[in-house]
Amino acid sequence: MKPAIDIQGLSVAFPSRTGTVHALQDLTLSVAPGTVFGFLGPNGAGKTTTIQVLLGFQEASAGTASLFGHATTHTIAREKIGYLSENPDSYNFLTGRELLTFAGRLFSLPSSEIKKRTAELLSETGLTEAADRRIATYSRGMRQRICMAQALINDPELLILDEPTGGLDPLGRRDIRRMIAARKEAGKTIFFSSHELSEVELACDRIAILSKGRLIAEGPVSSLVPPGESLERYFINTVSA
Amino acid sequence: MNKVITLVKIVWLEMIRRKDLYVLLILLATLLAALLSFDIFGLSQVAGYVKDMGLLAVWLLAWILTINTSVRQLPQEQQQGTLFTLLAKPVSRLDLILGKWLGAWSLTCLSLLCFYATLCLGVWIKGGFFNPTTLFQAILLHGAALSLVCSLGIALSTRMNRDAAQVTTYVVTGTAFVILPQVPSMLVGANTVTGSALYTIYYLFPHFEFFDLRRRLIHDGGHAPWLVVGEILIYAVFMTGVFLTLAWLGYRKRRFSRGDIL
């Protein structure tokens, strides 16, 4: 079976006034289907850059990245994925229902399937009553939930989440966590970056830690974190070293 | 193609909900009401005067609407962050450019029809009328000219921020419309260097004067030969293709990251 994510020798460099910035250096990583993978690192470590390469927002300076065997530069690689960013960016002039319909059409789903999935996701996110209101009137938590719903409209095999609970209140975090847990139970692959280490510890099968653009640790949480130590302690020690 | 159509629908919904079209329709109605009410130099009873001023207003309003609509499409997606949600889906950058162009152009064409309908009403009230065939040709060619403006605006917005693209599109299209028809007469007596520069400008800039049938409409000059209209439409398709290709070339390898503001 092809890995959900396969990254080989990935490097990303940007020219800047002071020289070249190496956002990522020789990153090699593989995520098997059905894994919940935590992608950790301090700010500026290269997590978001990696996600941007995986989503085709930018190209690598060296190395390759593929999703289910398809190069990330091809649109077909994005057929089976869902993406949620930290910022709940959506078209404020649309209603929640219209946003989900729009997302479903971009995946070329049949109308009946879009209707069915929209109703299910609105119910799951607790937005059924607000479905026909414009997103401009939604609270931040509601926006994050409708964005999560649009990321799930195609029932993705791989869910890429970039700080999904960042900036949310405890209730909002709980809702998003619940949705992630449901996908984990359904055997989907989840790749997420987060600073909420307790959350990662609970949800993830494997983790990778990035620092200054380089991979410094990777493996199952149980084998990386020594007994009696928290993931947070391990993370701080590893990154500081 | 389904994805392009979906993107077109989003452009339409946004424009309708922003109420841009209503503002322009109100402007045109106000202008026509003014033309019908005032008696400037005793000319208000002449339908030709209403035709002349009304057509000028239609060209100006359609020009403003097209540029303002087209140049904001792509930068706005990036500013709002919705570009990232879009590109994370199986949508190619060519789909995005075609969707935005088709959405903006189809909307401006629709508003163009509304402008001409309002104008025809004003002319009819003044006791005048337009030759239907010439009017059809004028609207057809006007719509084709807007396709050029729209694709140029989108092409420039892939390389500049929204404001710069807007000003450049105004300058390029304004120059092409006003100065380009004068170039052949400027060539008479020009030295080699000036002549070459003028020739370059003449062949490089789009020729909007080809699309302007206002004189025929105002003076009831009869319709243009269909062969010529066909050739102009082919020219419009070619130039639109050139600008959209340039837009795609400027966009296909572009690196997007949050925080970059176009």
Image: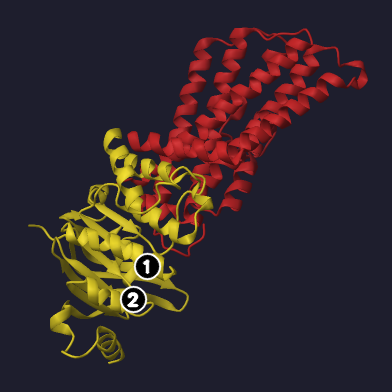
Task: Give x and y (percent) for residue A155.
Answer: 24, 49
Taking the spot 69% from the left edge, 33% from the top edge, the residue there is: B186
Q: Secondary structure at mark 2?
A: loop
Taking the spot 32% from the left edge, 38% from the top edge, the residue there is: A115
In the rendered image, the vertical position of residue A47 relative to residue B233, given as above or below: below
- Quick one: label 1 or label 2, which is nearer the N terminus? 1
For the residues marked 1 and 2, what is the alpha-carbon distance in whole angstroms? 10 Å
Q: Residue furthest left?
A: A1
Q: Is residue B180 visible?
A: no
Quadrant placement of the N terminus of chain A: bottom left
Front residue of B98/A45: it is: A45
In the rendered structure, which amino acid carries the disc numbered 1? Arg
Q: Report which residue position mark 2 lands on.
A: A196
Task: Give x and y (percent) for residue B187.
Answer: 66, 33
| Chain letter for the part of the structure drawn in yellow | A
Q: Colour of chain B?
A: red
Q: Secondary structure at mark 1?
A: helix
Taking the spot 55% from the left edge, 10% from the top edge, the residue there is: B225
Q: Report which residue position mark 1 lands on.
A: A173
Front residue of B59/A169: it is: A169
Rendered image: mark on residue A227 = none
The crowd level at tag 2 (other Cα within 10 Å; few <14, some 14-19, many 20+) is some
